[in-house]
Image (cartoon, rainbow, N blue to C red):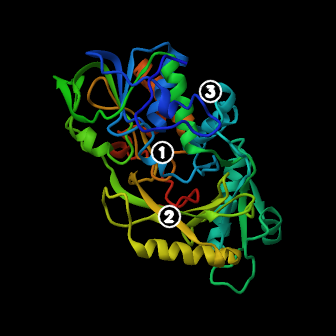
Amino acid sequence: MSTSTSVVGASPADGLPDHPAFLWRNPAPKPSYDVVIVGGGGHGLATAYYLAKNHGITNVAVLEKGWLAGGNMARNTTIIRSNYLWDESSGIYEHSLKLWEGLEEDLDYPILFSQRGVLNLAHGLQDVRDSRRRVYANQLNGIDAEWLEPEDVAKVCPIVNISPDIRYPVLGATYQPRAGIAKHDYVAWGFARRADEYGIDLIQNCEVTGLDVAGDRVVGVQTTRGRIAAGKVALSAAGHSSVLAGMAGLRLPIQSHPLQALVSELLEPVHPTVVMSNAVHVYVSQAHKGELVMGAGIDSYNGYGQRGAFHIIERQMSAALELFPVFARAHLLRTWAGIVDVTPDASPIVGLTPVDGLYLNCGWGTGGFKATPGVGWCFAHTVAHDEPHPYNAPFTLDRFTTGALVDEHGAAGVAH
C-alpha cells in the first residue's frame, strides 16, 4: 500500500489495521491530470481502478466534495442481482455480477459478498405473467432464473407470509440464486485501496464548482481547491449529475428524487435471502451484523434533501409487516435517504457527450450499487478509448432523441 497519512479523528476499523478509509494518501491536487473523475463513490472509484488496471492510465484524480464513498454509496441497500428483463440491461448487470463473483480476490480485500439469492414476489395475475416473462428472458440470456410457486417461496424463505388471506397474497416469485448482498463501504474502500496503490490521487473535500470548456472541448475543472487542468473529465456523481452537466451547458433528461431506506436493531439470523416486492414497494434483507435492511420506492417529489416523506416510511413498514409478520416486534434503528437520478426509461446514461472529452455516468435510479464493478469496467473503457464498451453502448445520451429507449419501468422489479 502507498505511504499514507491518517485522517485526524479517525480510527481503523476492527480487524482491518490498514483500513483505507483512514490510511490512504490524501494529496493536494496536481495542476493537471490526464483524467479527472468527478465523484468519489463506488462508480468513480471503480472507474479509476479499471482505468489503471485495464488501460494503464494512472495520471488520474478522483475528486470528492465530501469524503470518499460518503454519498449514495453509504446509503444504498447493498442488493446485487442481474435478473433484468431487457437484453441491454441484463448484459451490463450480468457482466457486473460476474465481476462481483471474483471481486474479493481481485481487490485482495474483504467485501463480504454473500450469494444468498433474491426473490421477486408476484401478487397478482399480471405480476405472474410479467414475472414469468422475465424468467424466460433471463434464461435466454444465460442468466440463472427460476419461477417458484408459493410453497417453494416458503422453502427458500420460511418467514414470508404466503397465506392467501392477506391484501397482497404471494402467488409466486422469480428467484435468482446467484444474487445477494455485499458490504457497501468495504467495496468502496477496496477499490480506493487498489486505485491508491496505482498512484491515482483520491482527493477529498474538493468540490467541483465549474467545468472549463474551450470551444467544444472540456479542458479542466474549477474546484474549491483551485483549478485543475484535465485531458478528459468523467462525471460520476450520483444525485447531482444534472447540476454538473449543466456547468458544461448540457441539459439532461433526469429528475432527482429522495430514495428512503431503514434498518432495524440487531437481530439473530432470521432472514436467509433477499425478498423484493414491487407491488408493495418494499425489499428486505438481513445485513451481516444482523440488522434488517429495508428499502422503499422513491418519493414522488423532486429534491436533493437526504431525507424523505414520513408516509413513505410508514407504508414501507406496513408492507413489510404484512409480508413478514415475524418482524412485528422488531425495533426501528434509523432511517435515511439517498438522492437518485431517474431517467424517463428508468435506465442509466453511460457514454460520451456532445462536449469533447466529457463523459457521463448517471441515471441509475435504484440500480447503482449492483452495477458498481460492471459500470466501472465499461466506463473506464469508454473514457480510455473515446467510444462505448459494447455493454454500455445502448445507454447513450442520444437514445432520448432517437427513441431507442431501454424501458425498465417495473419490468425488472425495480421500485421506480
Residue 228, quarter of the rendered image: top left
Residues at marks 1 and 2, CA–CA distance in whole angstroms: 17 Å
Q: Residue at x 41, y 35 (%)?
A: 40
Q: Amino acid at mark 3?
A: Leu
Of tags 3 and 2, the one toward the viewer is: 2
CA separation in Å, label 1 and label 3: 18 Å
- Give above or below for 409 relative to 180: below
In terms of depth relative to the viewer, which is nearer, 65 or 89? 65
Residue 218 vs residue 292: left or right? left
What residue is pinned by disc 3? 107
Q: Secondary structure at mark 2?
A: strand
C-beta proximity under 8 Å, tags 3 and 2: no
In the picture, measured across the screen, residue 78 lies left or right of residue 248, that is right
| Mark closer to the chain start, 1 or 3 | 1
What's the residue at 57%, 28% (across, down)?
A: 18
Alpha carbon separation for disc pair 3 and 2: 31 Å
Q: Is residue 367 above or below residue 269?
A: above
- Tell me, yes or no, if residue 389 can be seen here: no
Residue at image point 45% right, 14% down: 57
Q: Residue 206 location, x and y as percent? A: 29, 33
Quadrant in the picture for residue 320: bottom right
| Type of the residue with mark 1 | Met
Question: Which of disc 2 and disc 3 is earlier in sequence?
Answer: 3
Which percent across, then down, holds residue 25? Answer: 43, 22
Marks 1 and 2: CB-CB under 8 Å? Answer: no
Q: For residue 73, which numbered disc appears in the image? A: 1
Residue 328 at x, y percent in the picture: 65, 78
- Measured as percent of width and height from the top left, residue 127 is found at 63, 69
Q: Given the image, on which type of amino acid does mark 2 rest?
A: Arg
* Residue at numbered disc 2: 334
